[in-house]
Image: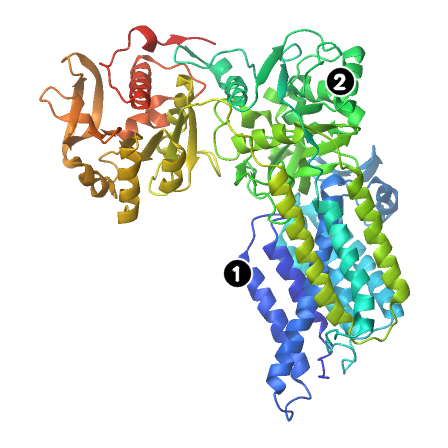
Amino acid sequence: MGRVINSGWLLLWFLSSAWLFLMPVFGPPAPLWGAGALALAVGFGFLGFRVGRKSKPFALFFSLADSLTLCGLIFLAQAAALPLFYFLGARYHHVPLLQPLVYPLLKAAGLGISLSDGAFFVQTVDRVSKVSITLERLGFFPFLLYLAGGLMLLFATGQSRSRMVKFFLLLGGYCSARFLILLLISIDIDSQCIFWSSLITSVSFFPFILILVELLPLPARLSSLAVVYPGVGKKPFRAGSPLFLGALFLILAVGFKDPGVKKPGLLLIDEAHSEWEWTDEKFDTRLFGKRTDYNFYCLSEYLTCFYPQVKKNYQPLTRQTLTGVDVLILKTPTQEYSDEEIEAIDDFVARGGGLFLIGDHTNVFGMSTYLNKVAARFGLRFRYDVTYDLPTCQLSLYQPPAILPHPVVQHIPVFLFGSSCTLTIPLTASSVITGYGLRNHYLDYSRKNFFPVPEEDPDYEFGLFVQSAAVSYHQGRVLAYTDSTCFSNFFIFIPGKPELLLGSVEWLNRKNRYGIINFILLLAGVGCFLSLAIIWRPGRKDFLGSLLTFGLLAVVLGVSISHLLNRKNYSYPKPRRNFIQVALESEHSSSFLPVRRLAENPDHSFLTFFVWIQRLGYVPCLKPSLEEALQCGHVAVVIDPVKDFTHQEISELKQYLLRGGSLLVLDSPRNQRSTANRMLKEFGLTIDRHHIVRGRIFDQAALPLGEFDQAGQIKGGSPLLTDRQGNAVFSIKKYGAGLIAVLSASHLFQDESLGYTSSIPDEYQRWLSGIEFWIFESLARKEFRPFSLSGQWSVISGQ
């Protein structure tokens, strides 16, 4: 065995700090800091084991191997504690029981403080600050990291149970003292950032390491770190089998989701209780305004492509109304449900129905209050708050976990929230979306839509929150989701939103069948670990080897089985009817859509252009590669390309057009890095960026249209829009059975010119919108008729 320096607790500090920097619990990860902390942990371990091995052969190799093994064991122990943190940290925040205990200590510190309604009120120089005790402020996340890692370190170095108890008491005492000190500082600076900053949190636990060095030093010589891997005899397998089975059963108990019995898919959307996010206001080329923007019409129409029946209800909900319904959607209610309706809904779910509850932020329009009367039957509650990204107070991003995601979100890409509320859920519920790196603020009735001002509310919760939850109730299922904005017409087809919608409805469109299996697996797992405690004998040197061998094998196998089963059982439904899909690609295009954030400047955003495609009854989508766009789109769109097209991509484009696809290329002289011509020349088209076309534009009949402020001259093809001299700004060319179209003034379709999705277009914007409608309608049918704003292209403003 090697020797270890007495400051070996530094290894635990570096590993715990690495988790703080690598996990996006309180902010974006800092990979370089995390990797540096991991490297230093291994380095300190190596130095510790290197002592006393200088004269031994292969000393460097064995010292590095022991260091990597010890760091790996501690890291695995901390990883095993993460599910507990995500489970409890997202569900529980306030710790009111500690308020009476902390109050006299703060009073003794000389603060002008009072205790009322489960919170402290502190009188400062210019204001009264409200302060609550939460798990995040107490340092629950680092506490679990140090607890799991420290116990593994003590166990690996052969320490007694009494020393482990002493470590636990020291850690609990230090976290309490740390909380009080940071609380006093936060009150003084009127900020909570010291509680969630990864760097400050890491540094704040360094004194704890110094305390451990003095009061709980590690031995000079390790006695039980040598990892003896289990052999092929009976004893290792007799001990390893319960460990393997116990871990496997527990993982399957968490990861396996009942596939249930699939139902026909008869959907009912309740309109009787909602005056928001309407589904019966048509989204077309004639009616514009905010009422068509915050609207679920496209959601409703999109569901009809996948399910045989999507009805709307305008009557009170009764057992008769819900007869024959498979999934009931209650969205953004603005009036309450009667007791009789709630009983009917309860009975509907118990008999195998699926209930989709869609709410929004801050109890706006009272919708959380009305939803909670229904949700309470299933142990759910929409809170009266709103969430933001913790460091920036901007909209938050969500990426589904790579390991054991819920079937609802297992297929979605990165997801940009609008402004969700959070959920209170029971222990038996599944957290479908556990948001991370968030802060929440409670409603402010004095402000529009009840949005609070984050800067005026320092007493916020932060960290993990439940933003969507699922409950099994007898034979049926309930799914609660907290951000209706994501399903509005202007957001519904941004990546992540249609995937979440279909994943939600598909999970709800099942009757429970094998729900008892999870409970049986849980009992079996607990039983295996109890038998392991009985069989195991202390002092066995192959324990760590068994932990690595049997434990890791069980984890890998359990996660893989759960993942494969859930992927197989919960695939997306196949379309039941054809619809026209317009695919924008982002591999070469430099256009902006709000996939990860909102646009900072309207002159870079093509959101309105994207959403206007829906007004034709088409389905737009954004694909990360040209190949994917060509595979799914009846019309493929490239906007302001800046990346070169490969020979393979040009070949795929040609095959796409030969099969009858349509390609739209939008570019502009403003795009200084344009690569459009390198692709267009393969089809006999080019954009002359040096010949700028301005002024009045004419159609094929020489009728004057609107004005182009700046466009490149298009050479080749059949010109459809030109200036007075016949210089083309829009031209088309047939290729095989397909059609390629080029417009050389893409900036006119940016939000700055086209307007916002909720605004009523002026005369010029109506003309630009008409051009877009004309282009896409013509490309979809592969035939260009003369452009006109009369007839079907007329635009009627409306609210």
Q: Is residue 275 visible?
A: no
Left or right position of 431 against 111 = left
Label 1: element kind: helix
Residue pushed farthest bottom? 55
Q: Is 158 rendered above or below residue 393? A: below
Q: Quadrant of residue 649?
A: top left
Is 699 in front, or is 477? 477
> Looking at the picture, how far across and down is residue 684, in whole percent?
16, 36
Q: Is residue 692 visible?
A: yes
Q: Quadrant of residue 569?
A: top right
Q: Quadrant of residue 440?
A: top right
Amino acid at pointer 2: Ile
Which residue occupies 73% across, 84% down?
1
Question: Which comes before the other along the chain, label 2 or label 1?
Answer: 1
Q: Which mark is residue 345?
A: 2
Left or right position of 697 against 70 = left
State how the image is colored: rainbow
Amino acid at pointer 1: Leu
Where is mark 1, residue-wise?
Answer: 32
Q: Is 133 rendered above or below residue 423? A: below
> Looking at the picture, how far across and down is residue 240, in whole percent?
79, 66
- Disc 2 packing (10 Å; few <14; some 14–19; many ≥20): many
